Image: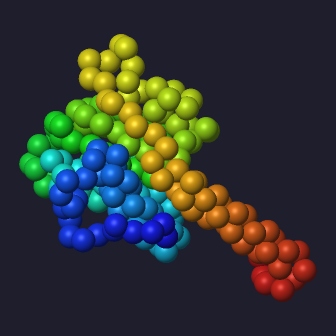
């Protein structure tokens, strides 16, 4: 866990610069990614913030909820919509530890989120500039401001550690199956 100005309560400390606020909320999102990982999910966490206050949290839940749309950002957007009783989340900022996929990027445009702050780029499916850009596209009538790379080293390390240990786990199962230590 990166050194923390984490979780005082659910508002950001006063008098922080925009950059410090971004770091504060990304650390919060990181803690939600840890929660996802502890539940056996890919470690991605998201928070939706409005006027310096936490409106909603989300973390990956695709496996447990048997839901391909169970991404951290979708959960944050859904919870935020319920909290403010409006699907439009005008002037809000969404923080997420991994660059959004096309589904989540499009949902953010529908929700009129103002800013997207993400940590690690996703070079395979990232839809905020890495592979596609669906959040600031000239053809869309709503564009998000994008800030990337906040807490990037920590969030990238968290993801690569997760995938590395998952690969090692799969390899070990294969080895045991092969040697007859466990039944297939
Ligand atoms: Zn997604």
Decide if residue 37 is on the left or right side of residue 144: right
Q: Is residue 55 visible?
A: no
Above-or-below relation of 136 to 86:
above
Answer with the quarter of the image where residue 175 lies: bottom right
Q: Nearer the viewer, residue 177 or 130?
A: 130
Location of residue 46 in the rendering, given as x and y in whole percent from the top left corner: 36, 54
Location of residue 5 in the rendering, given as x and y in whole percent from the top left corner: 34, 67
Decide if residue 183 is on the left or right side of residue 35: right
Above-or-below relation of 175 to 86:
below
Count how many numbered circles sit on residues in the image.
Answer: 0
Q: Is residue 4 visible?
A: yes
Decide if residue 119 is on the left or right side of residue 20: right
Residue at x-position 40% and y-position 50%: 96
Above-or-below relation of 46 to 147:
below
Decide if residue 176 is on the left or right side of residue 27: right
Say how the picture is coloured: rainbow
Residue at x-position 90% and y-position 80%: 179
- Residue at the bottom extreme of this rendering: 181
Q: Nearer the viewer, residue 106 or 153?
A: 153
- Residue at the top extreme of this rendering: 139
- Residue at the left extreme of this rendering: 85
Answer with the quarter of the image where residue 7 lies: bottom left
Where does the C terminus fall, quadrant-wise? Answer: bottom right
Residue at x-position 15% and y-position 47%: 51
Q: Nearer the viewer, residue 39 or 45?
A: 45
Residue at x-position 61% and y-position 38%: 123
């Amino acid at each position: 866990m990166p050194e923390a100005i984490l979780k005082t309560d659910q508002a950001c400390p006063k008098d922080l610069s925009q950059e410090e606020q971004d770091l504060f909320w990304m650390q919060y999102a990181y803690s939600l990614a840890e929660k996802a990982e502890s539940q056996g999910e890919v470690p991605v966490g998201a928070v939706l913030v409005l006027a310096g206050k936490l409106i909603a949290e989300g973390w990956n839940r695709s496996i447990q909820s048997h839901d391909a749309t169970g991404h951290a950002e979708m959960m944050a957007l859904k919870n935020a919509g319920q909290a403010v009783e409006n699907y439009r989340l005008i002037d809000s900022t969404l923080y997420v530890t991994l660059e959004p996929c096309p589904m989540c990027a499009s949902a953010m445009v529908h929700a009129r989120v103002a800013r997207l702050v993400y940590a690690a780029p996703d070079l395979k499916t990232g839809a905020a500039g890495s592979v596609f850009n669906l959040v600031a596209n000239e053809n869309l009538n709503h564009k998000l401001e994008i800030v990337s790379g906040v807490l990037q080293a920590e969030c990238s390390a968290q993801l690569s550690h997760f995938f590395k240990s998952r690969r090692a786990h799969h390899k070990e199962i294969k080895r045991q199956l092969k040697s007859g230590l466990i039944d297939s």
